[in-house]
């Protein structure tokens, strides 16, 4: 019996050992799963850097877009180097400097065929008043007129070319001229020879083209352009050049390279100089459509016949012969009295 009891105790112990072993085997997969679960956590965590790694890739595109900005910005200095600041400002404001850049630049044409008569025989009469008197009336102060007419009898001129004060008296010493701001011969060589006769007469009588100035400085100017002559009064040079540009723009005249450069040097000191108000100085309405027929001047008669050479206009007026018109023997003998070469002496 003892033996049998011992056998059962041994069997029971064996069963207990097997049960314990079974429990260990059963918990072993759980441990493996725990380890596997723990192992997957880093795997998921490992994907986070993968997503994070894409962020730099997306961020890397930003410099690419930014890199294009300097390329656009780089075009600005190229424009600035070819167009100085004052020229760009002038173009924006519509100044004389901007208008100068739009004038054609060509060489001077030959003076062949030029004469004052190509621009009319003298001052045109507009609404019954000669152009000379219209300009005197505009430019003089303290004016007095010949009774019942538009003719200026006396006045005071502030000469824009010199700054001098000149007293004007009709019939006195010829101290006031009407200057063509763009000389007629200069206009002839820069496009006017291609115009119609009517357009040339209009040009020669256009108030924009005319200024009352001192006689001596007008003769010093002659037919020079801005490359060869500028007003002695420096304070008027910007306005003078601007007026020449306005005239040439109105009539389609060109400038030479030397003339353009001279104008630019003047305007560089006053880049905001505006053109004169051409609307306030409209071109006159001239009815001339063809030049007067060319007729040879009659041969001068001897002095006994009334043709005399006068020393000055006062003597002409004292003799009752003023004004002296071109095409007459008296004019031919007294051309020296036609100081402004307009075909009318002692007017």
Image (cartoon, grey):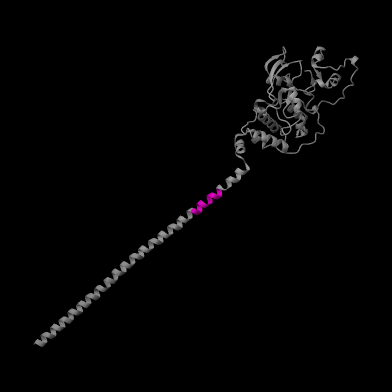
x then y, percent, for residue 65? 50, 52
Residue at figure coordinates x 11%, y 88% from the top left:
3
- Provide residue 214's location: percent of width, then percent of height: 73, 22
Q: Residue at x 67, y 35 (%)?
A: 265
Is residue 212 inside the magenta stretch? Answer: no
Taking 121 as reference, is 318 above or below it? above
Q: Which residues are magenta?
A: 63-72
Query: Is residue 194 placed above or below 138 in the rendered structure?
Result: below
- Residue 249 lies, in percent from the top left, at 69, 33
Q: Is residue 68 magenta?
A: yes
**Residue placed at 20% from the left, 77% from the top?**
20
Mark yes or no: residue 286 visible.
no
Asked whether the viewer can see residue 119, the reply is yes
The percent coordinates of residue 321 (x first, y second) are 82, 14
Please tell me whether the stretch drawn in magenta is mainly helix, strand or loop: helix
The C terminus sits in image quarter: top right
């Amino acid at each position: 019996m003892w033996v049998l009891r011992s056998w059962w105790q041994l069997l029971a112990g064996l069963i207990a050992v097997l049960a314990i072993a079974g429990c260990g085997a059963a918990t072993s997969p759980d441990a493996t799963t725990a380890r596997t679960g723990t192992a997957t956590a880093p795997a998921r965590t490992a994907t986070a850097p993968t997503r994070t790694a894409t962020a730099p890739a997306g961020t890397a595109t930003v410099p690419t877009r930014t890199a294009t900005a300097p390329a656009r910005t780089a075009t600005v200095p190229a424009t600035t180097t070819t167009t100085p600041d004052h020229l760009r400002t002038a173009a924006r404001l519509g100044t004389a400097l901007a208008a100068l850049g739009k004038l054609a630049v060509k060489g001077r044409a030959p003076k062949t065929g030029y004469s004052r008569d190509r621009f009319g025989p003298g001052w045109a009469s507009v609404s019954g008043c000669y152009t000379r008197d219209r300009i005197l009336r505009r430019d003089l102060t303290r004016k007095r007129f010949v009774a019942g007419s538009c003719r200026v009898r006396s006045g005071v001129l502030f000469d824009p070319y010199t700054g001098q004060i000149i007293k004007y008296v009709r019939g006195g010493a010829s101290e006031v001229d009407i200057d063509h701001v763009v000389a007629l011969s200069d206009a002839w060589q820069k496009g006017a020879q291609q115009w119609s006769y009517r357009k040339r007469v209009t040009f020669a009588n256009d108030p924009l083209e005319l200024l009352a100035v001192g006689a001596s400085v007008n003769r010093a100017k002659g037919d020079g352009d801005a490359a060869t002559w500028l007003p002695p009064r420096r304070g008027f040079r910007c306005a003078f050049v601007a007026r020449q540009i306005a005239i040439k723009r109105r009539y389609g005249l060109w400038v030479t390279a030397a003339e353009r450069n001279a104008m630019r040097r003047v305007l560089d000191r006053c880049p905001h100089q505006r053109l004169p108000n051409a609307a306030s100085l409209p071109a006159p309405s001239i009815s001339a459509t063809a030049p007067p027929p060319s007729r040879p001047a009659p041969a001068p008669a001897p002095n006994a016949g009334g043709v005399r050479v006068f020393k000055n206009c006062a003597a002409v007026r004292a003799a009752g012969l003023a004004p002296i018109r071109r095409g007459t023997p008296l004019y031919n003998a007294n051309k020296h009295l036609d100081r402004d070469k307009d075909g009318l002496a002692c007017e």
